[in-house]
Image: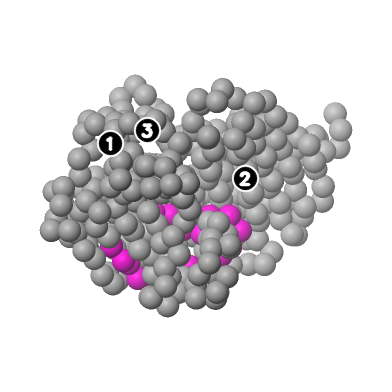
Amino acid sequence: MTAGRRMLAAWGAAAAVAGVAAQAPFATQVVGFQTNGNAGGGIFNPPNALGAPQGALDVHSLGIGGELTLGLQTAITDGPGADFLVGENPFRLAGAADLVFAEVMFVEVSSNGVDFARFPASYYGPATQPGPFGAVVVGSYSGLAGQTPVLLPSNPGADPQDVVEAGGDAFDLRDLAQHPLVLQQLVDLTNITQVRLVDVVSGQSLDHRSRPIFDPGSGSADVDAITVVHQRGSVSQNGPSVELEIHMDGTARLRLEDPDGWSDLDPGSFRAALYGIPVPAAALFGSLQLVQADANGFTLVQPVPLPSNLLFTVAFALKDQAGHRSGQSRARPAN
C-alpha cells in the first residue's frame, strides 16, 4: 500500500457518523413578493419563508410565475463550496428514491437590492410535461431550487448548515463569477444581502440554453427557507475546501483539502449523499480512485463513464478540527 493510500485509508476509517448542531442564520425579512393573483393556488403567507426550514405546509407559494424577495440580517459571502441552501417542499415517491414531485424556481442574489444576478439554470429531463401528479428524477435540474427534499425537520439533531444533513438545494456564489452584473461590480459576491426566488412556469420558462423547463404539478413552487452556509466576516482563510466536478459522461473529480494540512480535516464530519439521500461516506472510498495525496489533502476520481440517460446528484460536506465547513452538491450534466 502506498503512503497516499495509507493516509486515505486511515482517514476514511474514521469517517463515521458524528457532528454537532450549529446555530445557522436564516432569512429574516420579507422584502417583497407578487403572486400573480395567487395563481395556481397554494399557501400564500410570505413570513412562512423566514426562519429555519419546517417542511410540509409551513411554506409560501410563489404563485405561477410569481416571486419572493427575502432579506438576510447577516450577508452571504463566497466561501469554499456551497454558500447557501434553498428549501422547498418536494417529496419522494414511495419505493423510488430517485423520483420526486418537485416544483422548481430560479434563484437570484443581490448586494444592493436593485441588481439581481440569476444562477445559470439547466434542465436535463424529458421535453414533456410530467403532469399534475408526475415526478422527475433528482438530477433533472441544475441551478434551480426545489428538487431536493429538506431533511432538517425530520432530523432535529442535524446541522442546518450542512449541505448533506440539512437537505434542500445548495448554491455556490462562485458559479456567478462571470455573470455580467458581477463583472460590472453591481453584484458583490462577498456581500449578498437579498435572495429572490422566481417561479418556473412549466413548459414556458427557459433555462440558460434557451430550452423549456418542465416540472410536475399545476401550481407553483413553495418556499420553505433560506439557510446561510457562509456568512460575511466568519469564513476562515484556513478552513477546509470541498471541490466537486461531475462531467457530462458521468465521471467525477472530488478534492478534499485544508490549508493547515490534511490532518486538520475532521473525518467524523465527512458526509455524502446521492439523490439528496445521506449515505455512509466511508463506503464511497470503495467506488472512488485516489489519484493524488499530498500534504493538504486528497484528490479522488470516479473514472468510469456512466450511461448517458442516468441523471443524479452527489453531495459532500466536511469540517476541519475547528468546525469550519465546506460542502458541495452537483447534478450530472446532460446534453
Residue 250 falls inside the magenta stretch: no
Q: Distance between the residues labelled 2 and 1?
A: 29 Å
Q: Closest to the observer: 1 or 290?
A: 290
Magenta residues? Answer: 68-88
Report how many numbered discs are placed on residues in the image: 3
The amino acid at mark 1 is Pro
Q: Closest to the observer: 156 or 297?
A: 297
Name the secondary structure under disc 2: strand
Viewer-side label of 2, 1: 1
Residue at x 45% of width, y 65% of height: 117
Residue at x 51% of width, y 26% of height: 310
Viewer-side label of 2, 3: 3
The circle on residue 127 is: 3
The circle on residue 244 is: 2
Query: Around disc 3, counting alpha carbons within 10 Å, would you say few (fewer than 14), some (14 to 19), or many (20 or more)?
Result: few
Are the two marked residues, 1 and 3, in contact with CB atoms closer than 8 angstroms?
A: no
Are the two marked residues, 2 and 1, in contact with CB atoms closer than 8 angstroms?
A: no
Name the secondary structure under disc 1: loop
Q: Which secondary structure class fits the magenta region best? A: strand
Name the secondary structure under disc 3: loop
Query: Around disc 1, counting alpha carbons within 10 Å, would you say few (fewer than 14), some (14 to 19), or many (20 or more)?
Result: many
